[in-house]
Image: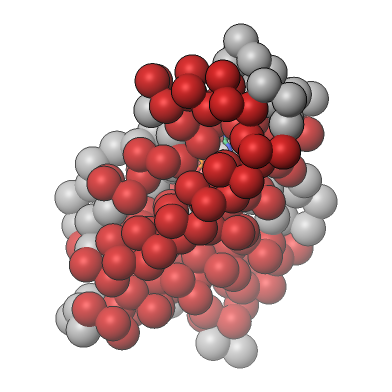
Amino acid sequence: MDIIERCKLFVKNRLSDEKSGHDWHHTLRVFENALDIVKKDGFNVDLTVVKLGALFHDVADHKFGYSDGDRENIIKNAIGVHNLSDEQINHVVYIANNTSFSKGKSLETLESKIVQDADRLDALGAIGIARAFTYGGFRKRDIYNIEGDNDTISHFYEKLLKLKDLMNTEAGKKEALQREQFMVAFLKQFFKEINEGEKYEKSHREWG
Ligand code: ADP
Ligand code: NI
């Protein structure tokens, strides 16, 4: 089995019980998004690093108490030291340690920027809406509350609607714009349907 297929199985097994929105299907979508960006922008990159970076980007997340060192060990064990150059392995580890959506770091290599965009795209659009409410439910948050206090709708304004302007690649930007438009339409309809929606929409617009 080739290294990508082997690592896919490894990550799939590790993420099978993950319920906070960083599940295996998220990883697979990020993998596909990353390849799509490479193709559309015609980038000349180390494709193995992009693929493995995408596969490992949410393994042993810091949110669940893992350190950068823990992640490094897990990734090195999974890849196996003889299969890639040290430089490639370190690059994959760099991607896994730094692309976190919550860290929002600015990255140094094209491969990591591609994976970061691919991960951000999955926080946008219809899938992004679904993931936000899944995560909110996981954290026992309100769908919305008028105080804008730790609710999932607030997350759209605090984070998701800012992502489009943070994209690194042209293909990523273009897709992010389309996905954001869908989210804005969703929010408009959402506010229309709830009581005091107008007031609520206005209070959010002011922060957004
Ligand atoms: P990462 O693991 O890359 O740091 P996050 O855990 O911050 O990413 O985000 C992963 C997904 O969870 C995204 O789709 C994001 O919208 C969602 N998410 C993160 N924080 C919140 C929140 N406070 N409310 C709702 N969704 C959230
Ligand atoms: Ni992710």
Front in this rendered view, residue 151 or 48: 151
- Kindly identify the residue that appears in the image at 45 percent across and 71 percent down: 33
Residue located 59% across and 49% down the image: 186
- Residue 123 can be seen, yes or no: no
- What residue is at 68 percent from the left and 62 percent from the top? 24
**x and y percentages locating residue 139 in the rendered image:** 74, 27
Position of residue 152 in the picture relative to residue 178 (left or right): right
The residue sitting at 43% across, 53% down in the picture is: 180
Q: Position of residue 94 (x, y in %)?
A: 33, 50
Judging from the image, the colouring scheme is secondary structure
Q: How many marks?
A: 0
Q: Is residue 174 left or right of residue 119?
A: left
Extreme-bottom residue of the structure: 1
Q: Is residue 159 visible?
A: yes
Q: In the shown orientation, is residue 114 left or right of residue 146?
A: left
Q: Is residue 197 left or right of residue 175?
A: right
Residue 161 position (above or below residue 23): above
- Depicted 86 relative to depicted 187: above or below: below
**x then y, percent, for residue 161:** 41, 41
**2 to 75, vertically: above or below:** below
Q: From the image, which quarter does the C terminus lie in?
A: top left
Residue sitting nearer the eye, 9 or 90: 9
Q: Position of residue 3 (x, y in %)?
A: 52, 80
Front-most of residues 94 and 133: 133
Quadrant of the image occupied by residue 6: bottom right
